[in-house]
Image (cartoon, helix red, strand yellow):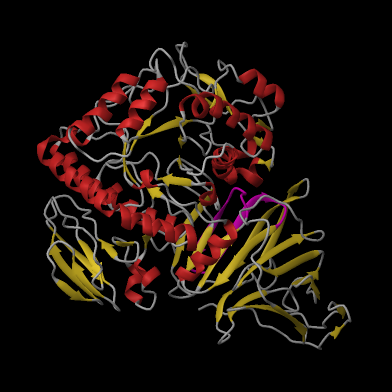
Amino acid sequence: MNQPAENHPGQPGQQGPSGTSGQPGQGSASLAQSSPTVGTFRERDGALEWSGRQETVRIEPWGPDAVRVRARLGGPVLEGLPGALLDEAPPTEASVKIEDGRGQLTVGALTVEVDAEGLVRFLRTDDSAELLTEERAHFWWPGPRLYTPVGNGHHRLEQRFAAYEGEKLYGLGQHQHGLLDQKGAVLDLVQRNAEVTIPVLTSSRGYTLLWNSPAIGRVELAGNGTRWVADSARQIDYWITAGQPADAQRRYSAVTGRTPMLPEWAAGFWQCKLRYRTQDELLGVAREYKRRGLPIDAIVCDFFHWTHLGEWKFDPAEWPDPAAMQRELEELGIKLVVSVWPSVSPLSENHQLMEQRGYFIGTQYGPMAHADWPDKEVASTVQVAFYDATNPEARDFMWSRIKENYLDPYGITAFWLDACEPELKPGFQENLRYWAGPGLEVGNMYPSENARTFYEGMIAAGETEIVTLNRSAWAGSQRYGAALWSGDIGTDFATLRRQIAAGLNTSLSGIPWWNTDIGGFHGGDPDDPAYREVMIRWFQFGALSPLMRLHGFRDPGMPLGPDMTGGPNEVWSYGEEAGTIMEKYLRLRERLKPYVLDVMRAAHEEGLPVMRPLFLEFPDDQATWSVADSYLFGPDLLVAPVLTAGASVRTAYLPAGARWTDAWTGTSYEGGTNVTVDAPLDRIPLFLRDGAALPIAG
């Protein structure tokens, strides 16, 4: 592995009566550097600070076994910048020691050392083993932290760490590259449809790190080092904890906020398609599910149900009596979920007022229009703006429209927050000006702030069950009741395979409420036998996902516009054989709801994910760190989806340290080995841990 830069201890410093260093520790600097610096250490309010060459590095306890590190060029660290951490750190005991030209801060299982030149190392406290260290890019210049001016006090920031042989890296939100272990990848830190930036990284070496910056940038997980980059920001800010992945999830969720308790209805089956165009069509589908005796808990009213984009209310021409619709759905035991977009058409009754009050995202150059989009009553697209979710007044206004048009008259409390990246065309964050700051500095936080609009509005309205379905997310979105789905993806087996890694990395990024469009989004012919096989296998996976939601833009499709819809997408739309199998998994999900809710409570109370990589429960089994095609659903159920066309058997790895029982056949296996089991079209391989009793077979 790469070794940290050599340290050169010097003379011990003199400790002043207040606990700060009366004289700086006199370390010595390496002459191989450009303008070598021996910095000054001090203890301040329980934190360790190093200063040198106009740079300040502040390291402070931030929860058990964890610290927050901030570094700034040109003055003390700044407070109050946008980030994911909660305002107050969990209380914890820590100790600071300054001697021999070094600084050291110890917080439980984590010890941080800083040498005379400001190089930071993170160690396990019990055995002093190195978890992670900063690393210089070059012996001369630059150092591990680089600040390149971009004007007005902002810098292009780089933070470099060493690379380690055999290290595996997970998390970082949701991506469609299909990688579980992302070592070797380069990822843009930017929000896009189906590419969700949540900059928290879990390492097989025993640490988890949050890059606590919503700036646009990238992370490079190279063989010769890790580099975090913010294209334009004011200071480096990250949080790190030591411990196994499950403990790290507890620590991370404690400092970024835990998800609320999932309502019972949301643990069941959600029916959706692009799109039900009228009230009668939506109700007809809901009635048919009930007529057939099929479980259904939610149905979604998709986009273009509105009068104009940005008016956030039902079009009476297509939805003449929402109150009656809502009453009937409630009587049927079905929750109505309504699509809400953050974009505002110039035809909207709200556009002029919102522009006058400064409620839109601004631009550095040009008008406040960020995308072209179809709207009703016009033959062409219009230039739409986006409300600024980082502006508290804009959030209040947005919620006032939602409350007036959905909650108060109809009691609608569940919302689908689509296009919440936001969906820019083109996606140049450099041109945006948010209330919270320039686009390059704060752009990634938008989806979290958008979810916050609805969470805080619902809380203020006295609602206690809060779920929003979001196309994008950022660190901390979970505390606002945000569920994430994997965006507008393909409809083939290759795409289905990629969703396993996407879901597991999302889970390790603090988002326990996750799902895919069952069957994928872009197309899929319900009459095509090959696609029916994809749908069956995806439906099985969906039944064993944190949330189960059927959606997609099925063939035959129509051009984008207010009159559009896609082909049928209900469980009976795929023929008798497929429909019978899908019904089987609807009923399985219904039987598993008590277990799902138990696992959701663990997410709410402890921050543990629902969909778990095998190594979360079995970190000592080294083989589990490489399993990317199966997962644990809660602690007791191992799921091995069938991900290949025509497959009728499936080989799965069963972790060592437990005994596993095939949930369909009752055959028992000792862990620590691969097993091959039958997987006919109607069966997804499932294994129960150590005799767990779950109603799989009915």
The rendered magenta stretch, by its main secondary structure, is classed as strand
Q: Position of residue 470 (x, y in %)?
A: 46, 41
Pick the residue in front: 6 or 509.
509
- 651 inside magenta stretch: no
Q: Is residue 159 above or below residue 192?
A: below
The quadrant holding residue 55 is bottom right
What residue appears at the point 75 percent right and 72 percent down from the top-left corner?
Answer: 46
The quadrant holding residue 89 is bottom right
What residue appears at the point 67 percent right and 76 percent down from the top-left corner?
Answer: 93
40 sits left or right of 264 in the view: right
The segment highlighted magenta reads 213-235
The quadrant holding residue 402 is top right
Locate the C terminus and report the quarter of the image it occupies. Answer: bottom left
Residue 274 visible, this orientation:
no
What residue appears at the point 53 percent right and 33 percent down from the top-left corner?
Answer: 424
Pick the residue in front: 305 or 30.
305
Residue 580 visible, this orientation:
yes
Q: Position of residue 578 (x, y in %)?
A: 14, 41
Q: Position of residue 244 (x, y in %)?
A: 47, 73
410 sits left or right of 8 in the view: left
- 221 inside magenta stretch: yes
Q: Is residue 533 above or below residue 255?
A: above
